[in-house]
Amino acid sequence: MKQDIRFVTAPDGVRIACAFAGTGTPLVKAPTWLSHVGMDSDSPVWRHWWEALAAKHFFVRFDQRGSGLSDRTVPEFSFASWVSDLECVVDTFGLERFILFGMSQGGPIAVEYAARHPERLSHLVIVGGYARGWAQRGQPTDEQKALLTLIKHGWATDNPAFRQVFTTQFMPDATADQMRWFNDLERASASPENALLFQEEVGNINVTESARSVRVPTLVFHSQDDARVPADQGRELAALIPTARLVLLPSKNHILLENESAWPIFVQQMEAFLAGPASADALPGLRPEVQSLSSRELEVLRLIARGFTDRDISADLGISTRTVGNHVRSILNKTGCSNRTAAAIWAARSSIV
């Protein structure tokens, strides 16, 4: 894919490497770790992503500080600095209004930006994202502790076995060639010290409050059997954002591969969404009665629209059937619907499901 690479300078002096391609409505990808704009444009893992995002848009992406072609030694390494870098990039390029795309760790960065600058965004697309990092979901698991140890001792070695653990989580269905390339990307994208800092900071992310204030039309994608970020994290994020619709994809891969069935579903759903209303005011999901629903009520309503019974919802959300019943009665009261079927139809018309 043909692209141009330029550098912008963050307020604290860090140089950020940016790549852009295509023409049309601006679409900006929020930063993530494991990024290298100089080597991934024609890779067997990312090429189809960048081509799809640049096909109808002026597509901008950049290496997160501390990785890729951006400065590796930085004065601040935090979630706040990642959001600030996103603000710096779009302001430097003069993007007054654009589509924001957040993948994985870029999801919560995109959510935070959307909460702060709703007037700048026409649409928000999140893939494999979450509201809470791994350390915010309860006690760190033995697996997470082991991954940190692997980064510390095996990231820079010539033997890819250590990095293969990460690659398998991101793409369990990848080919040998795709896995080899991603193993190489991991080492090329960041030093062991920065990789460890990335992983630790990602664990502490929490944008639950910011997500509740997002009013931008939002589409949340998540692989049903995601081996890196569990699908319940995508469901939680979609439930927190009042304007969000959730699409679960038939895949185990955190990074969708070009030859799997989930890929064309993703492309079709995303294109249809981006062709829709380009302002929050045009979205029927922003009617006052929608805004009155709590995040839990929105989650229950989405499950009702999928045909779940109270018992099913109870099992899925880990709450009692009595509590489900209370939520259902509140939903019917707030939406003015007479029964569950009417509520399901109302949810579909309001772009909630």
Image (cartoon, helix red, strand yellow):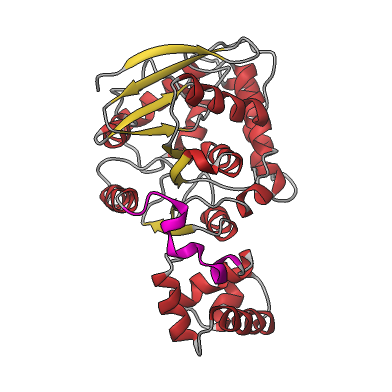
Q: Is 287 placed left or right of 197 in the picture?
A: left
Q: Position of residue 249 (x, y in %)?
A: 38, 55
Q: Residue at x 61, y 77 (%)?
A: 314
286 is higher (above) or lower (below) than 311: above
User: Which residue is at the far bottom?
Assistant: 338
Residue at 45% in and 31% down: 96
- Magenta stretch, main secondary structure class: helix
Q: Is residue 66 above or below residue 122?
A: above
Percent of width and height locating residue 203: 67, 38
Identify which residue is drawn at 51% across, 29% down. 31
- The C terminus sits in image quarter: bottom left
Residue 224 appears in the figure: no
Q: Residue at x 50, y 62 (%)?
A: 286
Among the 4 quarters of the image, the one containing residue 78 = top right
Residue closest to the eye, 78 or 218: 218
Q: Nearer the viewer, residue 6 or 137?
A: 6
Question: What residue range appears in magenta?
Answer: 276-291
Q: Position of residue 15 (x, y in %)?
A: 54, 11
**Residue 289 in magenta stretch:** yes
- Asked if residue 334 shows in the view, the reply is yes
**Does the magenta-highlighted stretch encompass residue 282?**
yes
Left or right, 82 with reference to 344: right
Decide if residue 341 is on the left or right side of residue 44: right
Judging depth in this view, the residue of 147 and 125 nearest the camera is 125
Q: Position of residue 217 (x, y in %)?
A: 45, 52
- 312 left or right of 73 in image: left
Give the position of the N terminus as an image quadrant. top left
Considering depth in this image, is 103 or 199 the residue closer to the camera?
A: 103
Would you place residue 167 above or below residue 264 in this image? above
